[in-house]
Image (cartoon, rainbow, N blue to C red):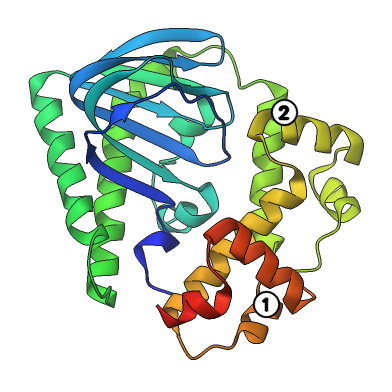
């Protein structure tokens, strides 16, 4: 399943559309870079202005988003820890995802040298993300480009991480562990009892904080991961049947799979596999 979407959940390069107020949360990590212009931004209880040369990373779980209508050119990347973590576990690797776990958010106003560096890194990701027919070479070059970007962020984060005295709030730690558990087990017949036991929380507390921080119920997120995996399976082999993919990603009933797929993707599984 060597597709760009298997390692990067969302990528939009140099978006220039007019921004509207949109507060949201999600389990994926996020990085935003401002190429030009400015807009007001909100994270948790904090608000500030992002301007040209600003880089911000977010853990995704805190409510965040633009606060007013403005226009700027920006690049936005979202990725899940489960998708990227296997790329960061080589011997002698640094923990490239630590900045995203440690901070609710962090922003830098980059100097000219670092601006030039990150703009080249983002351009490299764009080059290998938007390919018509991904092959193994372009997929691996995309992985390398993403790792270079994460190394850049890690390097920028060294001093802030050393100075950081507090730890992430307990709710965010619990939800992040839950997200990781789901991403590792969604293809199984995952029950709420099993999930709660796996992350050592009561199921009542788990369902409450998960909805509070992500905006999704536990099973909405499980289905989202299953449908994401189904899309990757169809893209990797158009000859797979809908029933085969249904069972492979964890659904027990094909009609339920088709309904969930249509709701999240906008087309039926049969239509998607023919694209």
- Residue that protrudes farthest toward the bottom in the picture: 239
Judging from the image, what secondary structure is the residue with disc 1 in? Answer: helix
What residue is shown with label 2? 212
In the rendering, which numbered label is found on residue 246? Answer: 1
- List x then y, in percent, for residue 69: 34, 17
Q: Quadrant of the C terminus?
A: bottom left
Compared to residue 94, the image places residue 228 above or below, namely below
Q: Residue at x 41, y 58 (%)?
A: 7
Pick whichever, 140 or 260, lies toward us.
260
Residue 134 sits in which quadrant? bottom left
Q: Residue at x 69, y 66 (%)?
A: 259
Mark 1 vs 2, N-terminal side: 2
Q: Quadrant of the N terminus?
A: bottom left
Compared to residue 6, the image places residue 272 above or below, namely below
- Determine contact: label 1, label 2, CB under 8 Å: no
- List x then y, in percent, for residue 165: 54, 11
């Amino acid at each position: 399943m060597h597709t760009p979407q298997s390692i990067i959940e969302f990528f939009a390069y140099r978006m220039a559309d007019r921004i509207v107020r949109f507060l949201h949360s999600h389990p994926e990590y996020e990085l935003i870079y401002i190429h030009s212009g400015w807009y007001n931004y909100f994270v948790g209880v904090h608000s500030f202005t992002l301007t040209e040369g600003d880089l911000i990373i977010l853990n995704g779980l805190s409510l965040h988003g633009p606060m007013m209508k403005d226009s700027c050119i920006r690049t936005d990347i979202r990725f899940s820890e489960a998708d990227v973590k296997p790329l960061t576990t080589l011997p002698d690797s640094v923990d490239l995802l630590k900045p995203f776990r440690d901070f609710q958010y962090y922003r830098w106003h980059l100097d000219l040298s670092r601006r030039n560096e990150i703009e080249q890194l983002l351009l490299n990701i764009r080059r290998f993300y938007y390919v018509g027919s991904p092959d193994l070479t372009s997929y691996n070059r995309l992985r390398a480009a993403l790792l270079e970007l994460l190394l850049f962020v890690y390097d920028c984060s060294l001093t802030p991480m050393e100075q950081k005295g507090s730890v992430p709030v307990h709710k965010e730690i619990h939800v992040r562990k839950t997200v990781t558990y789901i991403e590792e087990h969604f293809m199984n017949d995952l029950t709420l009892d099993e999930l709660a036991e796996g992350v050592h929380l009561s199921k009542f507390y788990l369902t409450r904080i998960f909805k509070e921080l992500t905006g999704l119920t536990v099973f909405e997120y499980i289905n989202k991961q299953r449908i994401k995996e189904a899309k990757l399976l169809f893209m990797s082999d158009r000859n797979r049947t809908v029933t085969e993919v249904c069972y492979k990603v964890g659904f027990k009933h094909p009609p339920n799979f088709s309904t969930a797929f249509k709701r999240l993707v906008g087309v039926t599984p049969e239509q998607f596999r023919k694209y």
